[in-house]
Amino acid sequence: MQRILILGGGGMIGQKLAWHLAGEGLNGDRDLDVTLHDLGYPEPSAPGRKRIGNVAVAGTMTAAVAEKPDVIFHLASVVSGEAEQDYDKGWAVNMHPMWELLEALRAHQAADPGYCPKVIFSSSIAVFGAPYPEAIGDTFLSAPLSSYGAQKAVCELMLSDASRKGFVDGISIRLPTVCVRPGKPNKAASGFFSGIIREPLNGKEAVLPVDDSVRHWLASPRSAVGFLVHAAGLDSARLEGRRALNMPGFSCTIAEQIEALRRAAGEDAVKLIRREPDEAIINIVKNWPRNFQTDRALALGFTAESDFDEIIRVYIEDERPGC
């Protein structure tokens, strides 16, 4: 039996991952013991043992891995906008717990040299900073221009070094902005990419704080879960020591998103989008990556949507079945 730990298991991606594991197993293995760890959980919640804890509190990560899980999905973090607004909280939640996690796993490995768990870390394309080429390739410099991006980049380096030393077998997957996110808006600066689709599809008004010409790199929640699952089964020898991967996605402008919404739901849905420029959001978004060329990830078997119409279809299928 494989022991699986999902840190951040109460969040949207953590819940979808847990539902996937309950229904389909992990890369063909259905004999799983799944534990979720978070501050709280939605109702109804995905199957698995539930543990409550704050990863920013000293000792929490050590306790979370006391049972020596075989696979750890590290999804716990505060989102981009919150990390930028609250500097102390961003570093306390997004960086320090990774150090405690790796130290706890190193201690387990010292006592049991045969123990080397798989650690899948949900990083972000925020590890990159402008100026950008037309499409960011696999060798582009990681030089973040936000606190959130810096925190993710530091965790990538820590995980890579711990893997080099043989304490863990880690992979960092740099997620595109996940869209269309279900549920209520969160504090992510990128939240409007989902909001301008989700809210109109549900008959509600949405605020667009940036210009229609803004271009960004997107993938669905279904793809994000697929990335995590695929990474857990990947032979890390194929990474050749480069343990951070840019995930595939689709690059499009806000105007193209809106046109896809029009095709999916008509003009009445589009009319629910209210343009309300927000300088704070504009200043954050202007430094974000716009397009990628993800040859490594594609060669390793990762897949995502090929257009925004498909991303909307996935949202409707997964969140509004029967519509």
Image: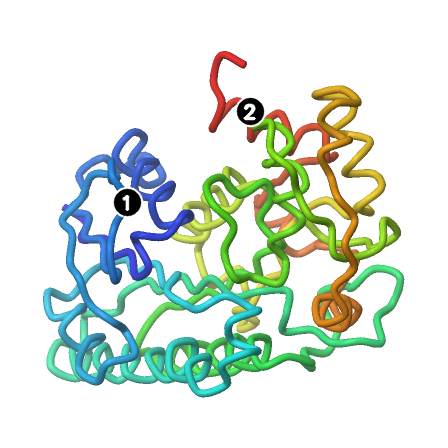
- Foreground residue, 202 or 232? 202
Q: Residue at x 82, y 47 (%)?
A: 253
Q: Residue at x 52, y 50 (%)?
A: 185
Q: Is residue 249 above or below residue 306?
A: below
Image quarter for residue 76? bottom left
How crowded pointer 2 is (Cα within 10 Å; few <14, some 14-19, many 20+) is rated as: some
Name the image quarter holding the C terminus.
top right
* Residue position marked by numbered label 2 in the rendering: 316
Say which amino acid is labelled 2: Ile
Label annotation for residue 250: none
Q: Is residue 283 left or right of residue 204?
A: right
Give the secondary structure at mark 1.
Answer: loop
**Where's residue 139, x and y in %?**
73, 71
* Residue position marked by numbered label 1 in the rendering: 42
Task: Give the CA distance from mark 2 to mark 1.
Answer: 20 Å
- Foreground residue, 313 or 134? 313
Q: Nearer the viewer, mark 2 or mark 1?
A: 1
Say which amino acid is labelled 1: Pro
Give the secondary structure at mark 2.
Answer: helix
